[in-house]
Image: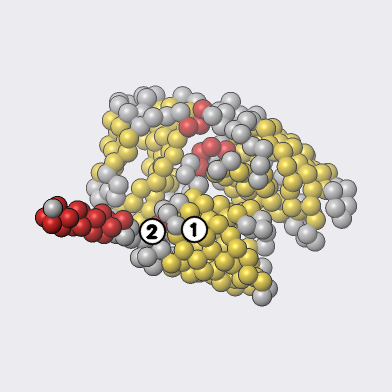
Amino acid sequence: MKKSLLLLSAAFTLFAATLSATSYSNASWNGAWMVTGLTQNYVIFDGAGNITAAGIPSATGAGTYNIAAGGAVTGTLNVGGTLCPFTGALSSDSVANVSVTYMSMSIPATFIAVKNTAVMQGTYDGTIVQTAGGSATLPINFTVDAMGNITSSTNLTGSISGALYYSNGKVTGLIKSGEAAPFTEIEINITSGYSGSNSLSGAATLTGSGKSGTFALTKSATVSVNTALAVQFNAYPNPAKDLFVVEGAVSNGNIKVYDVLGNVLMNTTITSSKTILNVSTLSKGVYFYNVTSGTAVSAGKFIVE
């Protein structure tokens, strides 16, 4: 009996040690993460301690962060020239609870990893109507790529940038354009009622004077939200050193590899059930990829050591 108890105790100690062995680092945050709290936005991390972009009105995206091995998080985000510190902790590899200080206010927020940036890929058409501080109306059209980036528009006359993401039943995005006020920045937040259909509707915040409005957008691309997740494949090893293998994707598609800024570094045609990419020329860091097959698109990320 005593021996059995000792063995049980040793097994429990090993199990507890395994549970506590989870180690985090700056690489735990990479790519796009939704920020849900008083508002819903997004922040893009480079996996190396830098914030490269933010879907928050007036935010430059400049900022830094640090994640300790135990999951404690600290950082700052530049919002309208004001450095806003935040602190918190990771509760898993895809969720972190933080507190952001802005104008002496402490704002609780949750960061949620965007697991698949290709979900919102497509072209959208709709109208935004200002409902506070004026009655301006703007027909709007924009295209979202497989990384979630807003890449072009047929009716916005100025330069356009921003992104649109989906995670956990929520949609968030920000369009920055060269339009006249109040349409220089359009923040898209849908916090409920979205179930993967091709239509979006909700409230938009128009930058300038805290003006708000409503919008209705219809996805006109043939790739639907549901089929965007249809490609089935295995990708390995991760981390990778010299070779990265994508296996199981249907042929007549392609694989694209992106850096954290969305630049396409590789674009390879799928010719068999196993495609081998030579990543030895890539610098150490975090990279993203998407696999297309017909009208289906899936995305992922990997690390090069």
Give the crowd class for mark 1: few <14, some 14-19, many >=20 residues within 10 Å. many
Residue at image position (50%, 66%) is 88
Tell me which amino acid carries mark 2.
Ala
Residue 140, placed above or below residue 111 = above
Residue 77, placed above or below residue 128 = below
Give the crowd class for mark 2: few <14, some 14-19, many >=20 residues within 10 Å. some
Q: Secondary structure at mark 1?
A: strand
Residue at image position (42%, 54%) is 92
From this viewpoint, which residue is outermost toward the bottom?
Answer: 104
Q: Quadrant of residue 214?
A: top right
Residue at image position (62%, 57%) is 37
Tell me which amino acid carries mark 1.
Ala
Please tell me how many numbered marks the rendered image carries. 2
Report x, y in % for residue 305.
28, 55
Say which of 171 and 63 sits in front: 171
Q: Which residue is mark 2?
A: 27
Which is closer to the viewer, label 1 or label 2?
1
Report x, y in % for residue 265.
40, 46
From this viewpoint, which residue is outermost toward the left?
Answer: 3
Residue 174 placement, left or right of 282: right
Is tag 1's residue or tag 2's residue first in the polypeptide sequence? 2
Residue at image position (61%, 50%) is 162
* Residue 76 seen in the figure: yes
Q: Which residue is mark 1?
A: 96
Report x, y in % for residue 254.
40, 32
* Residue 261 seen in the figure: no
